[in-house]
Amino acid sequence: MLILETIFWILLFVIVYTYVGYGILLYLIIKIRRLFNMGKKVEIDPAFEPEVTLFIAAYNEKDYVEAKMKNSLELEYPKEKLNIVWVTDGSDDGTPELLKKYPNTKVYHLDERNGKIGAMNRGMQFVKTPIVIFSDANTQLGKESVRRIVNLFSMPSVGCVSGEKRIIDKTADVASGAGEGLYWKYESALKKWDAELYSVVGAAGELFAIRTSLYRHVEQDTLLDDFMISLRVAQDGYTIQYDPEAYAIETASANVKEELKRKIRISAGGIQSVVRLSALLNIFKYGTLSFQYISHRVLRWTLTPLCLLILIPLLFVLAINEGLLEFGLYSTLFWLQTLFYIAALVGWFLENRSTSIKILFVPYYFFIMNLSVVLGFFRYMKKTQSVNWERAQRAT
């Protein structure tokens, strides 16, 4: 039993560290650095105002074109320095034709559909500005987003800037909206602390930017283009910075089924990324970046979901040995674990019912997140995940 107990505590440590411990440790490190005035100084040059390109890779986004263009043209940045580029590979719903009515926009269309990364690789040859900002067609950007992103590039060490993904917050929401919204609020806090310590570990595809000269052709079968592009910039010695006031906002997934579809794709892409970015696991070479990368990303996509699976039967065995109704340490933890999964089951039962008590959906969303990693792993191993757009349906 001693061996089982040791394994249990190792598994529990990995799980707690991944989802809570890293955030606490990061917060404490930041606080200590601030206390001793060791924090990273952000020195922005307000006079830095280069030309930029707003790059939108789109597939059949006719319903979003008008709103996206209106939003893009209202961004607070000199109009003569803001170039708007759409790459519409494979679109056959009239998206390219609709964009032609905007004279200040360049549209590069190809009838063949090669997925988002194919469109990005092809479209980057047309970008001539020193900074390129990637954004999705179905998101609305904060008015000052471009300005705030460019400000951070005035520091030579910055190679990539990630904006914040925001989910429209409703007073009452269903499981997908409540869970996704809470998740991204927590992610935002981690990104702010990551950036202050050294570098964010991955950018959100809804809004991120890089120095154009740092763009590397990405493999055609890449599933997480934003993650691969941004981490390779960091691998080259630059930092990824973050400004929560440079944001892209969108509605949550229409339901948990759509959110699970999106998460499985992300998980498959995450595992693919860990394999392709294996060099970043070398903490002796990449130091702080490796520590952040492993703690914030790698564990979530690899070891931790497996730990959660093993913990279920392991804790049951330890609780039986102790006496299920004795309420010792292991039996108490077993019943708490059981209660958590019952709460997830309740979340599943209530998933399409709006409620203002959003905390009810946390266990369910947590379960869905980790289930998606397991399913994503098998999809990655089978090589059945398509690189073509599979955008989840969004709530109205």
Image (cartoon, rainbow, N blue to C red):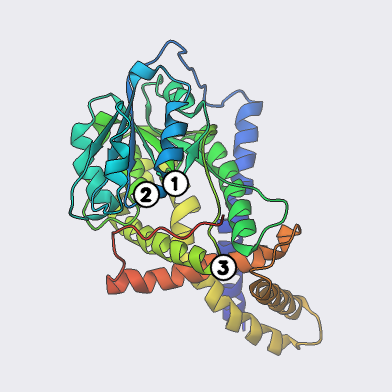
Closer to the eye: label 3 or 1 = 1
- Mark 1 to mark 2 CA distance (whole Å): 8 Å
Q: Residues within 10 Å of mark 3 (few under 14, many from 20)?
A: few
- Mark 3 to mark 2 CA distance (whole Å): 47 Å
- Mark 3 to mark 1 CA distance (whole Å): 43 Å
Instruction: Give the mark nearer the N terminus: 3 vs 1.
Output: 3
Tell me which amino acid carries mark 1: Asn
Residue at image mark 2: 61
Residue at image mark 1: 138
Tell me which amino acid carries mark 2: Glu
**Residue 131 image offset from top left, x and y in percent:** 32, 27
Q: Residues within 10 Å of mark 2 (few under 14, many from 20)?
A: many
Which quadrant is home to the C terminus?
Answer: bottom right
Q: Is residue 274 left or right of residue 189?
A: left
**Residue 157 image offset from top left, x and y in percent:** 37, 25
Q: Is residue 227 left or right of residue 164?
A: left
Which quadrant is home to the N terminus?
Answer: bottom right
